[in-house]
Every structure is written in structure tokens, then in C-alpha cells.
Image: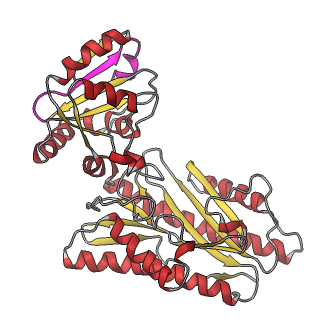
Amino acid sequence: MTTKALLVTPEGVARVQDALRERGLEGWLLCEFHGQNPVSRGLLGLEWTTRRSFVLVPAEGEPTALIHAIEHSSWAHWPRPRVEYAGWRDMEARLPELLGGRRRLAMEVSPGNAVPTLDLTPSGLLELLEGLGVEPVGSGDLVTTFYSVWSDEQLREHRANAEIVKAVARAAFERAAEAVRAGAPATEGALAAWIREELGRRGLTYGVDCIVAIGPRAADPHYDPGEVGETIEHGQVLLIDLWGKATEDGVPADQTWMGVLDDHVPEAAQRVWEAVRDARDAAVRFLRERAAAGEAVRGFEVDDVARGVIRERGWGDAFVHRTGHSIDRDLHGSGPNLDNLETRDDRTLVTGVGFSIEPGVYLRGDLGVRSEINVHWGADGPLVTPEGPQSEMFVLL
């Protein structure tokens, strides 16, 4: 249990209740079972649970938890009323009492599964609650504000994480180049194992992993080389995507870098790189312009900007994923994504959220190129991490 959990504190409850009243909602119903809802776990400070639990945060009045009779130890930190049940009949009898006739409730639902990271309420449970008169309202804006916004400490840690990730990426490219020079080239899997170990050695020990992929393999955005993979040889384009964080409650850094094991960048790869880099930079420029004008930004708008650049260069069909994902305490967070391809994410980038910007071009069987930075959307606009994003592909030999 984390003592920083928002809904364990009187101040946090008061803030949430203010937001509920502003939105004309009668409450926020948080449901949790076996870790299915990370939003509930984070806001309530839960660790290990194995039975269904519910917390109603009403717009007015005291939040109350409905928990299973065997899970009091998991809720020992909860300072407010708890009601217990044992059997399913008990639970279904006590749920209406918990709801207290309230109908219009925020829940982790997404109509049409439009935002999968928020569609966390099982369909059967939703059916049960609707049968009790509940009118579920998507909690997206509440989740963004109260779960996905970074604290000052999380921002400080993220910036430190970002510089470590950047340094390890650069060292990994040098390691690959040295192996080629020595006539004993490394494999993708071996270099990936070294990256994971090196991130840990430098203090990033939570959620650490990476993707190491040579040109044709990098055309699969989620390629996994396994323990061996392909050999990283002279003349190949190399993609390294790596991420991690220093503490459990921290915010990870997530970056992608590109290099070539040669003394020059092949012309075809350079054209693709320039399209990807320019799309990334156009997205940042758009964010800065909106911030300077004091105008709101929605996730899908940033995706449109980056995607437009790549489409103009002729590779629109090869940019097969969203421009960026939310980052909070989870690598793929619950806040707004930069997405108008996989979904139409129309959530507003509220002050304090973070996300990746990572356009890519994937030419199957030939080449994959991606450039990834992270952004914290602060009161003064976008703060880009790491310092000094990649401007040209690394020429390694």
C-alpha cells in the first residue's frame, strides 16, 4: 500500500468530490478484482486483492468500501467506512445499499471500447450495475486529472530516468560498433540483455525492458529477438527502444534511437529518417504553438500533425500505430494518447500529464525507423525529455 494514494487522504477526496460536482455526477464507483483496474488500485492504495471490491466516492458525503470478508488486511489502510460481504447473494444485496439510489456514476468504461486503457469494468459487472439503475459515465477526464497527472517528484525522477536511458542507449550503440570492429558482432538478443543489465546497474530497476532490432526486423514495431535474434553486422541499420524507472511509484522514461553500422547512412534510410524526425518535431512545434496561444490540445490533434508529415513524404500507409501513448506510473498510462488511428482520443491534455511522441515508418521486409521522445505537458507548455533529442542517425563506423 502506498501512503500517497489520493483517496486515502481527506484532501484527495475533497478534490475528487469538487470535480464530480462540476461534472454533474453523483459519484465515482471504483471497482477492483485481482488487479484488473490499475486506476482503482492506484487511487485506493491497494496491493494484493483476490475478491471483488467496490468503493463509492459520492459527490457529497463519506466514501464507503464494500469488501470481501477475508480481505480486511488488504484494506487495513482504508480510514473510512467498510461494509463486508461473503457470498455473492450478500454482495448483490449490499451493492444497492452502497449506491444509495445514486444513478449517474463515473466508472472506468469506454463506449464502443474507444479507449481500451479505460475500458476496465467487466461486461458482466456492468450488466449487474445497470440492472441496479446505474448510468455509467466514462471516467476519462477524472482518471487523467487524478491518476495520470505527474507530481513534482515524479517529474524530477522522470527527468533523471530520461538521462540514464539516453546514456545507456548511446553506450549500447557503441558496444554494437565495437563488436563489429573486433570481428565478433553481437546478436540482437545479447545486446538487449546487456541493455537491461546496464539500466539496472545505473539504478533503473522497475519496468525495465528494450527492443533491439536490425533493419528488416525493426519493420515489426514490437519485434522481440528473444535470447539470440539476428546478428548485428556491418552495414545494418539498428533500432534500440528502451525504457525503465528507478522507483515503483515513479514515471518511466521511454525512448527510441537509430544508428547505422557503417560510415554513412544509406540514402533510402536517410529519407525515411528525415520523415520520422520531422514528424516528431512537427508534433512538438504544434504543442508549443498551442501552449503559447493558451489553447487546449486533444490527443488526436497531435497525431494528425505528425501523421500528416509522414503522409506528405509518401509513407502514410507504413505508419501503422498511434503517434504516442500516455505515460504515468505505468509505461502505457491511463491518460490521453496521441491517437487518431487506432482510436480517436479526444481527451484533453491537462496540465501535468505526460506522453511519448514516437512516429515511425515500417517497410515490411526492408526497414523500420522510429524516433521516440517523451513530453511533460506543464503549465508553460511541453517539456521534452531527454535533453538533446536525436537529430541525425548515429553513424557508428
At horizontal 46% and vertical 77% (from top left) the residue drawn is 280
At horizontal 26% and vertical 35% (from top left) the residue drawn is 7
Residue 9, placed above or below residue 317? above
Res 240 → quadrant: bottom right
Q: Return the residue nearer the eye: 379 or 55.
A: 55
In percent of width and height, residue 311 lies at 49, 80
Q: Left or right: where does residue 73 sit relative to residue 166?
A: left
Q: Return the residue nearer the eye: 365 or 19.
A: 365
Q: Return the residue nearer the eye: 120 or 186.
A: 120
Q: Magenta region's main secondary structure?
A: loop
Residue 276, placed above or below residue 159? below
In percent of width and height, residue 226 lies at 74, 52
Res 255 → quadrant: bottom right
At horizontal 39% and vertical 22% (from top left) the residue drawn is 52
Res 379 → quadrant: bottom left
In percent of width and height, residue 223 lies at 67, 59
At horizontal 40% and vertical 70% (from top left) the residue drawn is 303
In percent of width and height, residue 138 lies at 27, 44
Q: Left or right: where does residue 99 sit relative to residue 301?
A: left
The residue segment tinted magenta is 59-80
